[in-house]
Amino acid sequence: APAAQQAQKTVLVTRMYDMSPLLTGQRIFPFRGQLPGSSADGKPSLSLSGGLGGGGGFGGGGMGSTAGGGMFSIPPTQVLQQFGGGGMGGIMPMGPTVSGDYQVDHVQDISVFEGLLLENVASETWQDNGEGSGTIRTVGTVLIVRQTEEVHQQVVAFLNDLTDGILGTDTYDVQLWWVPVAPAERLTVMQDVLSADSVEAGEATLTELSSVAGGLYCRLQCRERVVVNSTSGNWQPIIVGITPVVGGNSMGESPQTLHVNVGLTVEARLMEVPEYLQPKDGNEIVSLELSSAIVDRLDQVTEKIGNTSGAASLDRFEFAAHAQQDVLQIPLNQVTGAGTMTSLKGNPQAGAGRQDLQVFVLVRRLGSDD
């Protein structure tokens, strides 16, 4: 019996381990900080050529030739980098192309994990190390491991620890408020919110303050270390150029239309802060990477363009873009101020109707996937 048990321990068993979670990029959306009005460096989310075609869906764009040659009246950095990819827009002849650019972080080669197993799990039992009979082979995102049951248990434990260390297991609830406030009242509002008797009272105060005209609110559920995005608002159709159309014995002009999302765009990522960096007293803190942008339409001027009697109109819009990008240390379960943005509405020099936007954030941990 002891000999049989010993023989059983040396039997090699083949098992497959799917490494997709560790090979997939954690930043799985196309924003990558390229928000309206953002000055962040990096490759734009959208590439444009010719005049702009119809819109629709997230990042929708016109289809057709790139020889449109439309007239632009809006700064591209403010409104053309909102989305990449997404649904198809309206179809129009001679229109441009709008293409999304998915940029992915933290993509590893599967051979990295093969090497880690050879070095850290029963290193004396692997054929590749010249000492044992165990083998590792890869197919796509799968590790094919031939080893004893005992070593397989060690492989599972190692991969579980690795997954927890790289991906994390927690999910967070993130609430954000943008509160309109007169410059002279900024400090008072901040004190009223942060000195509330409870977290719930602070939430109620912020809900009331942000429900007025110009106030904004966003709520996200964030898996740890994974970027999440949210957008809200309305699609504003804008005529940005014309395309001559010839048919039979007549000639006309077809408008080229751009759809711009006027509203709020948010990108966030939550990460745990190591225990040795936690404050000795007070709430646990987490790291919040936050990018937000608000696009407002300020003014519109419509003018005729073209040489025919039925000339199309060109819409010239003025937009205000408020952009914020931060890496914040946020206490859990506590309302925290996250900055102030100066409004561009009205006449800032004269102070006519000017209101700033104070930003507040509340983060709660919802639980673990374990």
Image: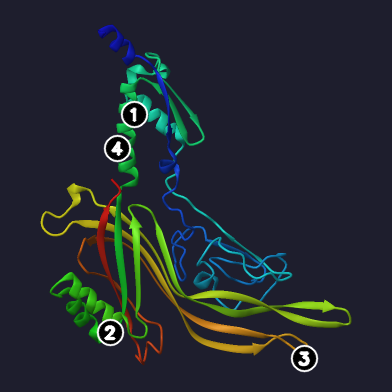
Residue at 63% in and 72% down:
54
Label located before the other in sequence (3 or 4)? 4
Q: Which residue is mark 3?
A: 309
Task: Give the CA separation, mark 1 to mark 4.
Answer: 10 Å
- How packed mark 3 is, by other alpha carbons closer than 10 Å (few <14, some 14-19, many 20 or more), is few
The location of residue 45, given as percent across then percent down, is 52, 61
Circle 4 is placed at which residue position? 161
Q: Which residue is mark 2?
A: 183
Q: Position of residue 67 (x, y in %)?
A: 73, 67
| Distance (Cα) linking label 4 and label 2 | 50 Å
Q: Quadrant of the N terminus?
A: top left
Q: Residue at x 33, y 85 (%)?
A: 212
What separation in Å lies between label 3 and label 1 (alpha carbons)?
A: 77 Å
Which mark, by number, is residue 155? 1
- Marks 3/2: CA–CA distance: 50 Å
Q: Nearer the viewer, residue 95 or 164?
A: 164
Q: Earlier in the sequence, mark 1 or mark 4?
A: 1
Q: Earlier in the sequence, mark 3 or mark 2?
A: 2
How many numbered discs sit on the rendered protein?
Answer: 4
Query: CB under 8 Å between callouts 3 and 2?
Result: no
Query: Residue placed farthest to the right in the image?
Result: 249
Local SS, label 4: helix
Q: Is residue 342 above or below residue 287?
A: below
